[in-house]
Amino acid sequence: MQDWDSPIDSGVVPEDGSIFDVIVVGGGPGGSATAAYMAMDGAKVLLLEKAVYPRDKTCGDAVGGKSLKHVEELGVKTALEQTNHFRVDGIIFGAPNGKEVRISLPEDEVENREAGYSLPRKQFDTVLFSNANEKVLKAGGAVIQNFAVKEVHIEGGVVTGISGLHEKNSYHFKAPLTIGAGGYNCPVARAVVDHHDEPMVDKKHYCAAYREYWTGVEGCEDWQGAIEIHFIDGVVPGYFWIFPVGNGVVNVGIGMVIAEMDKRKTKLRGLQDWVINEDPKFSKRFANAKMVEKSGKGWQLPFGSPRKKAPSFQPRRAAMAGAMCVGDAASLVDPFTGEGIGNALLSAKLASTVYDREKHSEGFSSDSASEYQNMLWGELSVELTNSYKLQRLVKKKSLMNFFIGKAVKKVELQRALTDMIASKEAQGQFHSKWWMIKTLLF
Ligand SMILES: Cc1cc2nc3c(=O)[nH]c(=O)nc-3n(C[C@H](O)[C@H](O)[C@H](O)COP(=O)(O)OP(=O)(O)OC[C@H]3O[C@@H](n4cnc5c(N)ncnc54)[C@H](O)[C@@H]3O)c2cc1C
């Protein structure tokens, strides 16, 4: 069994004032993957993480096929599979009228372990961080845990490094390139948008979510099965999820776009209590269940949905001279499913593709920043735009009832939904009016 539960030795803290090829701020999936990819290319990386591993991260814990491709490329798929995990082989969608349809993931992908897992982020992130730690140290870089970046230095319109605190001591480090991977409130992302006088938060594209761990939830006893997404009357336009993570433990939560929460003056924790205790269907399934103590936590998800009037780049500016942002720091969470790990890993890969150690040794130009930004949106615009359309579609309760009612009966629609989940591009047909009419009516 892979050891993911012990402290990670990050070695010696470098001297104040040290210079690196790249500084990575944040050691979640996005930061760990960027640091590992760049160290694999020979860069001298400084990886800075505020927490001390192993650490928890508030999440639904579903790791999809897109993430697994990168996990494999980073060389840790086997290590990950050696930790306890739930194998996802389908998704159950529940309509506001209570009807449910189970969409199977492609059988060959499940068999080849490419479809998806759900497992506590404490495990997933520790495996990725441990891998980055090893690769960065091997390539001559440094890693500091319990290091909070407080300031991003900008000279003449170029990010030149950071300063922050470790065990009450202040440090300043420099590099021609700084990566913002500090999540939804990343200081590098804030510096990038502030520098261009553009907004960081747009409440129509930021989601709040609340999760708890439970044991004893009916129908969640196995190590393989479906994860569940329910559009419950009273919760729509948000959704309620039930994601087993194995060993009889279940990640249960609710998410809603912040602008919608403000409109309804809703509190997610109260809403979740109501679903678990009062909803006729779910109160039965939770009748003998027990919440894991102190597991209730809320967090924010910066969606990658296209902004109506983006001040410059979509979904928002994620790079400038001397800096690129990845993952939540670049606002890349899928606006329909709430998945952000896959795009955190993908953006890490793209950032490492744009970065060239020799070319950028004297500086990372604003042209290189634009190259990254364009590559990011070029890669993600279709699926993020489609997901945003789906997010808006599920707000309409009667349409959801009709659609899921049809999907229960029509195998062709189930197959199309399987394709859609396996390949985001296939979502395109959901926006073809003729396809919709044909499939739903005949
Ligand atoms: C309730 C909830 C449910 C979700 N469910 C899913 C799901 O099921 N599947 C999925 O794919 N995605 C899900 N997401 C989204 C997913 O959690 C994120 O998209 C993903 O964690 C992004 O990874 P990241 O590396 O960009 O950022 P993070 O995971 O947030 O990592 C950022 C890291 O930076 C560190 N950091 C922050 N500030 C600083 C600083 N100043 N100095 C140094 N370090 C710093 C943090 O400690 C952290 O380790 C969910 C999110 C929420 C809130």
Image: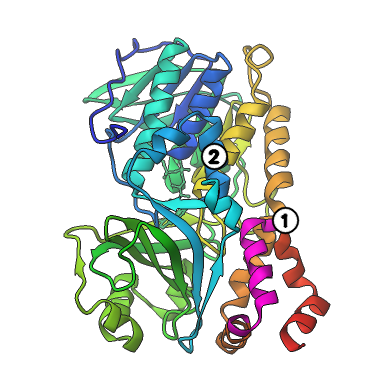
Number of numbered discs on residues: 2
Look at mark 2 in the image and give the residue it sits on. 345
Secondary element at tag 1: helix
Q: Secondary structure at mark 2?
A: helix
* Residue 201 image position (x, y, % from top left): 51, 55
Residue 410 located within the stretch drawn in magenta = yes
Left of 281 or right of it: where is 197? right
Mark 1 Cα-neighbour bin, 10 Å: few <14, some 14–19, many ≥20: some
Distance between mark 1 and mark 2 Cα atoms: 18 Å
Residue 382's label in the rendered image is 1
Q: Amino acid at mark 1?
A: Val
Amino acid residing under circle 2: Leu
**Is residue 330 shown to the viewer in this render?**
no
- The region drawn magenta spans 407-424
Picture quadrant where residue 106 is located: bottom right
Q: Nearer the viewer, residue 401 or 315?
A: 401
Rendered view: 398 above or below 250: below
Q: Residue at x 53, y 44 (%)?
A: 67
Q: Would residue 98 be seen by someone viewing this image from the given angle?
A: yes
